[in-house]
Image (cartoon, helix red, strand yellow):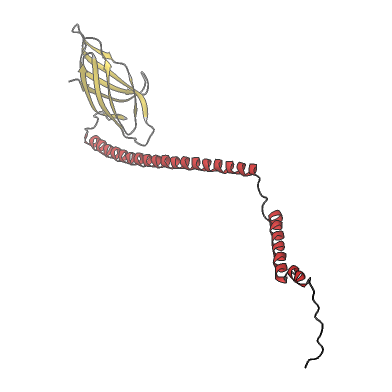
Amino acid sequence: MFGRSKPVVFDRYESRRSRKWIPNWLWLLLFGIAIGAGALFYAQQKLMPPRLSAEEASELRTALDSAEHERSRLAAQLAQSNHQLEDALATQNRMAGELAANHRDLARQRDHIEALLTALPPDPRSGMIAIRAADFKVAGDKLGYDMVFTRGEAKAAPFSGLMQLHVAGRTAGGTETTIALDPVAVKVGAYEIVHGSLPMPAGFVPRQTTIRLLDRPGGRQFGMRVINVQ
């Protein structure tokens, strides 16, 4: 029971060695941090875009601001162009409507004129160009006229020639005579309505007018009619 006891060895450095011992998990943590830092450095240097300097970052910001300003300007210009296009389209539609209305009015007027021409009495001389109606009015020393010409060959080329008026009447001194007024150029298609006035000698009183349609001065006669001046 009370056998020989073993000697006890006291190591005064044991506690110090135990305090210097580093656990394995800490080594693993430090190793993982080193691996992660290395991987991050490698990714930044090799895989990711290069990092910008302060000057490059400032230039990039300036370029972005300029691009944004240009984008805003172009957007405003586009909006203005769209507004102008809408106005142009509205104007075009309005003009197209007015043109269609004018065409309808012209068609109605043409129908009315053709109806009036049909109602006019025929030219008793039956020339190549019929003088269907003529009216004369004296205003001072001028002879005003309104005439209607028709042509049977409506599909042929228009007639281009002269209208010559020979006016019989009394001069200021009381002498009966016939005067020729200045010729007037006329062009007759299917029909032509002519208005105008011509000067006469001072004091001349017209009584009767002979209308002649010629192809040229002193040339071939295509129509003729005598009308009294009222």
Residue sitting at 20 percent across and 17 percent down? Answer: 138
> Is residue 188 shown above or below 178?
below
**Quarter occupied by residue 146:** top left
> Is residue 190 shown above or below 38?
above
In-image side of 221 versus 62 (left or right): left
Residue 28 in picture, x, y percent from top left: 71, 68
Residue 121 in picture, x, y percent from top left: 21, 32
**Front in this rendered view, residue 149 or 219:** 149
**Quarter occupied by residue 22:** bottom right
Residue sitting at 77 percent across and 70 percent down? Answer: 17
Residue 214 in picture, x, y percent from top left: 34, 23
Residue sitting at 21 percent across and 11 percent down? Answer: 204
Quarter of the picture containing the N terminus is bottom right
Of all residues, the one furthest to the bottom in this rendering is 1
> Is residue 187 shown above or below 203?
below
> Is residue 22 shown above or below 172?
below
